[in-house]
Amino acid sequence: MSAVAPTVAPDRRRGTELALLVFGVGLTVVAYANVGLAHDQQIPASTLAYGLGLGVLFLAAHLAVRRLAPYADPILLPAAAALNGLGLVLIRRLDLAAADRAHALGNHPPAAAAPLQLEWTVIGIALFVAVLFVIRDHRRLEVYTYTAMVVALLLLAIPAVLPASHSEVNGARIWIRFGGFSFQPGEVAKLALIVFFAGYLVRKRELLALAGRRVIGIDLPRARDLGPILLAWAVSLLILVREHDLGSSLLFFGIFLVILYVATQRSSWLILGIGLFLLGAVFAYFTIGHVHDRFDAWLHPFDKDIYERTFGGSYQLAQGLFGLATGGIFGTGLGQGRPNLVPFANTDFIMASLGEELGLAGVMATLTLYLLIVARGIRAAIGTKDAFGKLLAAGLAFGLALQVFVQVGGVTRLIPLTGLTLPFLSYGGSSLVSNWVVLALLLRVSDAARRPADDRPRPPTPEEATTMVVRRS
């Protein structure tokens, strides 16, 4: 009789994830201590408590992944934790600079942002665990395709209809503000739109993949199938015109375009989408003052007249470029630069703050962490068997990649400024919480992709995978 080979359980690599998390927390603690040394010439007394607190938070996230998504990619969580920890250190460093400036001027120091960002980190990780617990199979989200569309449109519309006093910050009407509470609904709308795009294109991908006329060697889509991309383009323009939000407009349209390409595998959709984007950009430049000012600041950041404008000037961009130049290759050292000279250094320009004090080496290391998250997200999209999961993971990963590109590109003057935050790094509760949810969904898809075939849950039935069936009597 031939011997039966024993079944070898696949390596879940949760130990690797834990080791990387410990390393990431250790780097954060060292950075925190460096800021204290540079500011007070001594290691802060709270360093140990700070490290233990972060360790407990990220350990809770790790235990949730170990229990609820045991086969998920082991790199995603440590990379996000390292970025989140570094962001907290940079925000604290800017808080200290703001307090020093207020003291020198004889004013009361402003409220510190780092403790609030830490609170949002706790909320983000709590939602991260909740998403993993509630969504045991990402395919169930397909049931809510059209519900997600309605939710997204409502969230995007709320700031547009609220009075400017409750929705506008720095010229962009993208907030819900009442009293001391503020929230950016577009961050949640982004997630809902990705679910809708993935679910809709799974249903329509065969029709949208049909070719129409062939022009210059390119199979263009049929005219009757242009409705979805024209609608997405129109909604993006409407956001831009009504809310003056160039970043979200570009982000939503870019995510839709990439998911459409992944669903149909036709480059003609990309060409058509890029053409529509350029057309919209030209229209916005000549008709929307806010966008016109952003382009002027981008093209001529050191022009005296543009530099000194009260609104729409290039002072912020120019100061950020000076900071990056000051940092050089290895930076001035944490706590030893002047990143606080840049307006909104802890939100829109946190990459300039990082570049000044950690240099090009720190910028490249940070971008590598983002690259790891995006690459592992795309790997999960390739590995999963169902079409909805592929589109969902691809949309989530590319959405994060596009947000990083747009934000860093604006700070480095590669493209005009848009006002987007840097995921996990910038100060802002809405962005931080939504990105932890994005990470949870990527881990859920990754778990499904890496899980052995005999341990996978059954797929949804046709009745479960349909939002609503209408029968004609």
Image (cartoon, helix red, strand yellow):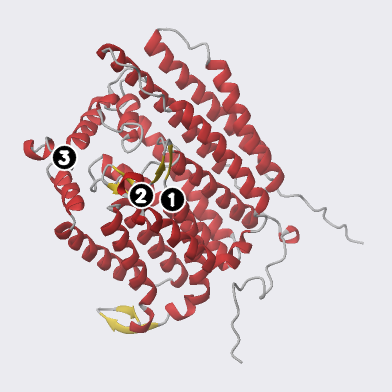
> In terms of secondary structure, where does tag 1 sit?
helix
The residue carrying mark 2 is 174
Q: Taking the image as drawn, is residue 71 in sight?
A: no
Q: Looking at the picture, which amino acid does disc 1 mark?
A: Pro
Q: Which mark is residue 23?
A: none
The residue carrying mark 3 is 313
CA gap between label 2 and label 3 equals: 21 Å
> Relative to residue 383, is residue 314 drawn left or right?
left
The residue carrying mark 1 is 185
Q: Residue furthest right?
A: 1
Tell me if label 2 and label 3 are in contact, CB under 8 Å: no
The image shows residue 324, relative to residue 41, as above or below, that is below
At a point 45% along the width and 81% down the height, the residue shown is 207
At a point 35% along the width and 36% down the height, the residue shown is 347
> In terms of secondary structure, where does tag 3 sit?
loop
The front one of 330 and 140 is 140
